[in-house]
Image: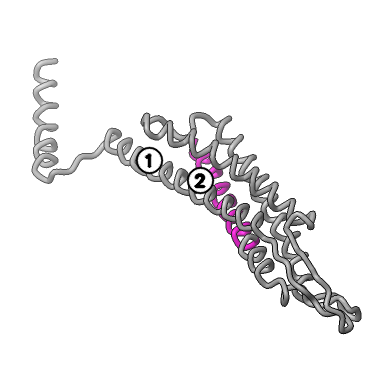
Amino acid sequence: MDGRRTTSELGIQLPEAKVAAETGTMSGPLVSDGADRKVSRKTELLHVVLRLVCLLTSVTALSVMVTAKEASTISIYGFNLPVYSKWSFSNSFEYLVGVSAAVAVHSVLQLLFSVSRLLRKFPVIPSRNHAWLIFAGDQVFAYAMMSAGSAASGVTNLNRTGIRHSALPNFCKPLHGFCNHVAVSIAFTFFTSFLLATSVVLDVIWLSKH
C-alpha cells in the first residue's frame, strides 16, 4: 500500500514539476525568501545612500557657515561706519554650526557601520534595539537641524530687513557676500533635516516588518 501510495503521489506531482520546468517558473517559500532578500538589500542600499547624502549636506552647511565673514562700510545718518560681520558673532549661527557638526559625526559613524556590514553581506540593521537607537538619533537630529535652521533664518531676515522706525539699515546690502553664505548654509541645513526625517520613516518601516 505504501509503495502504491508513493507511486500515486509521484504520478500526481510529476506533471506539475514538468509544467514548471517547461514554463521556467518556480514558486514556493524559497522563491518568496529570495524576493524578500532582494527587496531588503535594495532598502539597505537606499539607507546607505541616504546616510552619504546626509553627511555631504551637513558638512556643506557647516563649511559654508564657518566661511561666512566680510568687512565693509555702512552709512548711518550720513556717517560712513566700518562694519565687520562673522558667523561667530551670532549665537544662532554658532548653534547651527554645532548641530551640523554633530549630525556629520552621527552620519559618519552610521555610514561606516552600514558599509562595513554591507560589504560582509550582513544585515545593515542587526537588531530591533539597534533600529530603535537609530530611530531615536535620527529623530532628535532632525528636530535639532530644523530648530537651528529656523533660528538662523530669523537672524538673517533681521539682517536683510533691518528694524523698522530705527536707523538700523539693511546690513545685507554692504555685506551681501556674508548674507549669501548664511543663506546657502541655512538651505542645506533644512535639506539635511528633511533627509533625517526620511531616514526616520525608513526606520519605522523596518521596525514594522521585523
Q: Residues within 10 Å of mark 1 (few under 14, many from 20)?
A: some
In this view, 31 is above or below 168: above
Give the SS element for disc 2: helix
Residue bearing the label numbered 2: 51
Rounded to the nearest angstrom, the CA distance separating label 1 from label 2 is 15 Å
Q: Quadrant of residue 104?
A: top right
Question: How many marks overall?
Answer: 2
Indicate the position of residue 180 as horizontal and vertical percent values.
64, 68
**The N terminus lies in which quarter of the figure?**
top left
Q: Which amino acid, by three-letter code, is at mark 1?
A: Arg
Magenta extent: 186-210
Question: Mark 1 against mark 2, which lies toward the viewer?
Answer: 2
Q: Is residue 47 left or right of residue 21?
A: right
**Do the CB atoms of the residues marked 1 and 2 lie less than 8 Å apart?**
no
Residue at the (13%, 43%) spot, across then down: 24
Q: Quadrant of residue 138?
A: top right
Q: Is residue 201 magenta?
A: yes
Indicate the position of residue 77 as horizontal and vertical percent values.
89, 83
Residue bearing the label numbered 1: 41
- Which badge, 1 or 2, comes first in the chain's sequence? 1
